[in-house]
Image (spheres, helix red, strand yellow):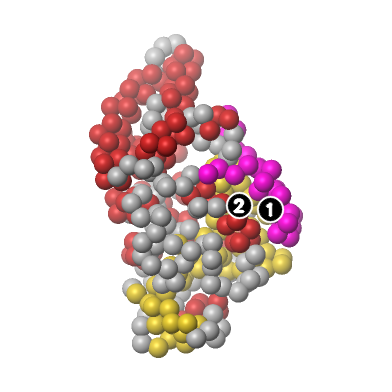
Amino acid sequence: MINYKLLKEIFPNAEIIDDKIIINNKKIPIENLIPRFTPNQSYSTGNFSRLRDKFAELQFDSKNNTTDRLNTILERTQWKKDFFKDKLILECGCGAGPDTEILLKLGAKVIAVDIAGLDIAQKNLGHNDNLLIIQADISDLPFSKNMFDIVWCHRVLQHTPAPEKVLKHILSYKKSNGFVFVHSYAKTLPQMFSWKYFLRPLTKNMNDKFLYKLVEIFTPPLFYFTCFLRKIPPNILGKILFKISQFTIPIRNYRFIDKFDNKDNQFIIEYAIHDTFDALSPKYDSPTSAKKIKEIAKNSDVKNFEVVTMGKFSPTPITLLRTIK
């Protein structure tokens, strides 16, 4: 049964008739308990859909026996756990649902939105009185403005066709005293000159099955080669060589990150395949500058916010827009 309570909270005038929702005289189909405002094919089909099929549960704390996603959320938002309780969150781009799982565990009510491929999220997350999954385009959301306590967009903005336009659009859905958390790849020289952006003009147009096979074949040897570089003595030389490899060798190697210390190489290789394919395959990948994000936030009446860039000199820096608590 669809979560009628949350549905009525965001669509007060909605009616459910058979397998459709009637909103403002428009009939929206419901399939697998998900209202579908968009078709199940989009620009994300072939890259993100393949990742969801292949790695449906990889990033879930409850499945990989880590607190990686929880720690990342708390570190990047700088919000305390109890802040999330009873907040109505618009999650723009939920993917398979790893953030959604954490937000629900922290006590939030979540409207989880993505443009396509939400059946995997539905399966992963199951029934929850505080969850409603909706298939819709975050550049054209079907909700009333100024509705949500928190507008949440994590690891999604850069993969939309027009990130600046999308950012303006989603910020209009927060309440006047609401909160925001938005993540974007940072537009820095180290990032733009890393291997990803040299290869993407070729790989983003490849057949996704062929590209995935290439990543699957080459990731294990590249993983062991970069691990070998890291262990070259003296220790300082190994660290330097490994750092250079992060910019020049097409693999995301997390072997030497503390949070995965207790994981075996097979897990790290699986993660590397996921994140390397994720770097090379999306149709769109457009980092937004911190200056532009700040300008849009000001013009969107976001109060008490900061824009910070993390890992400025790494090959994967990020920029965050967040309300200061």
Q: Secondary structure under badge 1?
A: helix
Instruction: Report the amino acid beneath label 2.
Output: Glu
Q: Which x, y percent locates residue 243?
A: 47, 23
Tell me the number on the disc at residue 296.
1
Q: Residue at x 38, y 30 (%)?
A: 250
Q: Which residues are magenta?
A: 286-313
Compared to residue 252, the image places residue 232 above or below, namely: above
Q: On the rendered structure, is 18 left or right of 241?
A: left
Tell me the number on the disc at residue 24.
none
Residue 170 forms part of the magenta stretch: no
Q: Which x, y percent locates residue 129?
A: 46, 74
Q: Quadrant of residue 39?
A: bottom left
Q: Secondary structure under badge 2?
A: helix
Compared to residue 139, the image places residue 60 above or below, namely: above
Residue 291 forms part of the magenta stretch: yes
**Which quadrant is home to the N terminus?**
bottom left
**N-term mark: 2 or 1:** 2
Q: Which x, y percent locates residue 54?
A: 29, 50
Q: Which x, y percent locates residue 265?
A: 31, 33
Tag 2 and tag 1, C-beta contact below 8 Å: yes
The residue closer to the viewer here, 105 or 243, is 243
Residue pointed to by mark 2? 164
Q: Residue at x 70, y 48 (%)?
A: 294
Q: On the rendered structure, is 306 left or right of 215?
A: right
Q: On the rendered structure, is 144 left or right of 30?
A: right
Instruction: Report the amino acid beneath label 1.
Output: Ile
Q: CA distance from mark 2 to mark 1?
A: 8 Å
Q: Residue at x 61, y 61 (%)?
A: 169
